[in-house]
Amino acid sequence: VAAVDAHDLAFGTSRWSSKLIHGGLRYLASAQLDVAHESAVERGVLMERTAPHLVRAQPFVLPLTPLVSRGHGALAWAGFRAG
């Protein structure tokens, strides 16, 4: 006999933790500041205590070409600094 439930105990945990690690800038862009802050705090805990062997800072390239206005470039840079 097998009981299959769509929402078991671990439902969404991998997806949610992945969003917390990767999603800081996305949440800032959509003005979800509380979630962006939670993401940054969780990322810090993972990098320093919980899983430093799995989570580490990576370089990021921001392609600010002449097609990107100064205002948008400044906004993107501010988002990076806030993230």
Image (cartoon, grey):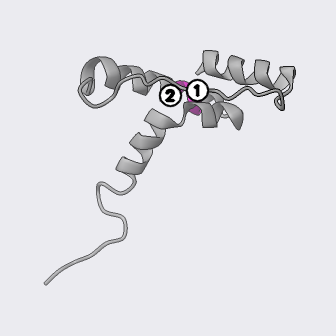
- Earlier sequence position, callout 1 versus callout 2: 2
Q: Residue 74's quadrant in the figure? A: top right
Q: Which residue is mark 2?
A: 38
- Helix, strand or loop: magenta stretch: helix
Please state which amino acid type lies under the numbered disc 1. Answer: Val
Q: Which residues are magenta?
A: 35-39
Left or right, 64 with respect to 52, comes to right
**In this picture, is 13 found above or below 73?**
below
Q: Which residue is mark 1?
A: 61
**Nearer to me, 7 or 61:** 61
Please state which amino acid type lies under the numbered disc 2. Answer: Glu
Residue 29 percent across, percent down from the top left: 70, 34
Residue 39 percent across, percent down from the top left: 49, 30
Q: Residue at x 42, y 50 (%)?
A: 15
**In this picture, is 30 found above or below 44?**
below
Q: Residue at x 57, y 33 (%)?
A: 35
